[in-house]
Image (cartoon, coloured by chain):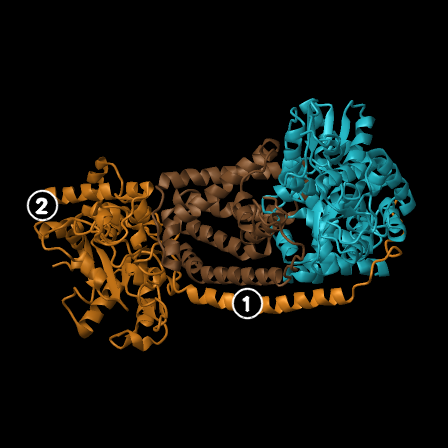
Amino acid sequence: MTPLQLLTWARGTGLGWALALCAAGIVLRLAEMLSLGRAADLAPPRARSPGSGWRTVFSRSLPPPGMFRREPVSYIAGYLFHLGLLFILFLSAAHIELFHALWGLAWPALPSPLVDAMALVAIVSLLVLLVQRLTHPVKRFLSGFQDYLTWAVTLLPLLTGYLATHHLLLDYPLMLALHILSVELLLVLLPFTKLFHSVSVFFSRWYNGDAFARKGVAS
Amino acid sequence: MSASLRRGINAFKEVIDAPIASFFSSCVHCGLCAEACLFYTETGDPKYTPIHKLEPLRRVWEQEYTVTGKLKRLLGLSRAVSDEELAEWGPLVYDSCTLCGRCAMVCPVGNDLTTMIRKMREGMSAAGHAPEGLVTATARAIQTGSPAGVKWVTLQAQIRHMQAEFDIEVPVNREGADYLVLMSSWEILNYPEYLGAVGRIFKQAGATWTLADDAYEATNSGIQIGASDLARELVGRIVTAAERLKVKCVVSPECGHAYTAIRWEGPNLMGRPFTFEVKHILEVLDELRRDGRLKLRGTLDVPLTYHDPCQLSRRGGVVEQPRTLLHELAPNFKEMSDAGTMNWCCGGGGGVSANERAHELQLTAFLRKKAQIEELGVKTVVTACANCRVVMEEALEHYHMDVEMLGLTELVAEHLAEDGQS
Amino acid sequence: MRSKHQLTVGEGLRQHGISRRAFLKFCASLAALMALPPSMAPAIAAAIGRARRQSVIWLSFQECTGCTESLTRSHSPTLEGLIFDLISLDYHHTLQAASGEAAEQDREQAMKDNEGKYLLVVDGSLPLGNPGYSTIAGRSNLDLLTETARGAAALVAVGTCAAFGGIPGADPNPTGAVPVGDIVKNKPIINIPGCPPIPLAITGTLAYFLTFGRIPELDARGRPRMFYGDTIHDRCYRRPFYDQGKFAASFDDAGARQGWCLFKLGCKGPVTRNACATLKWNEGTSFPIQSGHGCLGCSEPGFWDAGSFYRALSMPVGAVGATVAAGVAVGAAAGLAAALRNRSVRAGARAAHEKVGVAELGGGAEK
């Protein structure tokens, strides 16, 4: 198989399967999760509350009082990685073309040099997070095979994407094929690893906010 | 599998719901929950990371309620939770957690770890892995009505004493009263002035109230040990009395977990909404103040601060009421850093103070509170939970700190305007 | 008269009235093409001048004749045209004067006279599905190729069909088309792909062979590096716009009129190796991108099946939606089963609840 043929497979059959498995996995995990339901709370909620489920979905993205001082690296590297990833994913011209093809929607792209910078920011943040995971006593204590696997699976698309865009390391068709294949790997693993937090976080934050809100606390 | 382990694992399976499933699904091992937990911050031991305390529950969730978990179990990639493991987790779940709730405020993906620990205790207690002190307290509460074994006769003595000292009447078993007042054993034993304070305040406000001689204990060891069957029995006594006496409102005393037990868990344990309201004494005081029925005079001028009991403030929503009262009474009221819903636990709630095994750890955890007080440099700390008060008094003594603890209700009662004054 | 095979190239050129000056100019261009210093031009001239005219046999199989068309586009004497004075094209369906039996005899004679020394040029793919799909004088392509290749010094597969299977070889490949390289295994093969190839790629390669008597440096796909060493993308004059992120969104929009990068319009420049961006077409007039149309990737294997010509490289190939919908359906079915099982497991646990009294607490065995 030539690199161009591998690329064509990755753009076609591979992508179809990866998206299908990802979608199937997400639906399955959500069903597993939500089928367990939440018992009605018979205790009367507070009449007025500064909090709510939806509020926490968004507000939990900010560090709570006192926490940033304690863990600045976690917050800064975490933000930069996520923001960088989202920027690249949704604001680079090549990816917008992909979404255009999949969903029929398109929107303006950021200039390529800016996307480049965000990619480097995201990659460096991931490296910082890995070092932190290996050296911070709590993170090292909590981490196992899955944490390092998901780290690698997250880094690969960023790294191969950067290399492909800049025609570095390998022949372009091969580099681009590897980039797309690495994304497909991430898609397939997403529902079955902690990467699923990208979907479940909306639920967990909402449940949290709702529970605290009933008691009159904004969490 | 032994009968007790089976009971425990079964209880784990019973309590897992969609929120818990979403929490375990979302955890990314960021470790930020550890930085919110005083047991980690003051010891530096990563095993006190809140999410780690939940590992056995997580494995049961994964193995019983997810396809991948079942697969892993089949392929031998995930082992069943064992009795040894639950024994090992006992100190993590009971000694190093007061259900304070800070972790739940901090987790970036929104995990309510506190509620998960509460639920995990259901399995731990059913499997026989609850700590001795807490088991003894629970047994005493079931058998005698009070975890400290305080009997009605003891309370009767306090009643006589208060009536004489403050010229009040303490009604017992009065039907149709506005308020059924509960007490905690700590108050009865250590701070009996609380009863006098309540009596004086209600007298001035013209509110009708009563005690019940078969339901005077507010605390609920069943909640702390995490055995809903027992918690239900304990709270049921209050509900029965309240309905029998047809009171409008049950007043939870200065105690954190008692409030949680009756206000938030109570109806769910009983399986039906209450026909009466439930309020913490501070909520009652605040209402009376807003209605103009609470007339105060004078101030306590020393620099002081307020310690938020976790179950009252962060897990209960009674945050502003004590501050409103203190602003009226204490011109030198200063807030600690991290005050309000992010305040640090005294280290003794959630059953820890009844747990001898946890004593050393609890004293170490108190270093966080110590630092907060020292940072502010005050010598007076007001609070509204008798357990916090006892725990902190002991710890302050241990660390040779010259700091006085005050109860807010007593403070209010001390500053009631006599007739004619304002 | 000596047979045309026995004339030297120099003698042949003089016979055609090509001046020494024109010939030297040609050799200077050849030197430049091959990235050699200008001082090599006299050496090239001497070598070519002395050489016996190279015998070339050209076999055409499943082809459209586009490759020959490309090579012969000349209305006035051009560099491409001059090559025909340097070689002896002993067999070529379109260009030969003879036909029928006479043509076949010419081929066989040339093969005999130049045994082991002639170049075999092939355009078009070979149908292995059924030899009847393409025959010449009643003989299958496969037979003709194997017979003619036996005495050749080297093979030149001209055009993407001969080099990689080309358009006949595209999905579903009804004729079972294969490239030359799949059939001939024991001879050196130079692939000069393109649909059609740039004329200079053909003539330049032949000139190299004539000058140095050996095959030029080839890449992993057998293509001469001097013409196929770079991608279109690496030599494209619109590359700065790619780097800046300025793309034409549709044909003839504002960006297109400003000559912006055609990535979004499906340009395959980044994955295509050819010399179009430097040598261009029609004697250096233009090339597709310069004319506002994305590169089709025609010199790459499987270019016809590499997704639509108008879909950017980052877009999916084929309809992905249906597969995803199927995935969602499978997930929903599995999810329903999982949901029912979860609820049943929990209901079972609740039914199996054993009341926890003080005795069950274990009497506080944990100290």
Q: Which chain is orange?
A: C
Q: Colour of chain A?
A: brown
- Given the image, on which type of amino acid does mark 2 rest? Ser
Which marked residue is nearer to the observer: mark 1 or mark 2?
Answer: 1
Q: Which residue is mark 2?
A: C19
Q: Residue at x 32, y 50 (%)?
A: C273
Quadrant for the C terminus of chain C, please: top right
Residue B20, image x and y in percent?
65, 54
Q: In the image, is B354 to the left or to the right of C111?
A: right
Task: Answer few, some or many: residues within 10 Å of disc 1's Cα (few below 14, many 20 plus, some between 14 and 19).
Answer: many
Residue situated in front as seen by the camera: B207 or B313 = B207
In the rendered image of the structure, the colour used to display chain B is cyan
C366 w.r.t. C311: above or below: above
* Residue C11 rendering spot, x and y as whole percentages: 13, 50
Count of picture labels: 2
Q: The residue marked by circle 1 belongs to what chain?
A: C
Query: Can I make out residue C345 in this image?
Result: yes
The picture quadrant where one finds residue B375 is top right
The x and y percentages for residue B35 are 66, 36
Q: Which mark is residue C332?
A: 1
Q: Which residue is outermost to the left?
A: C17
Pointer 1 or 2: first along the chain: 2
Secondary structure of the residue carrying numbered label 2: loop
Q: Observer-nearest residue: B278 or A25?
A: B278
Eyeballing the image, is A125 above or below B242? above
Give the x, y percent position of residue B52. 71, 45
Question: Which chain's residue wears label 2?
Answer: C
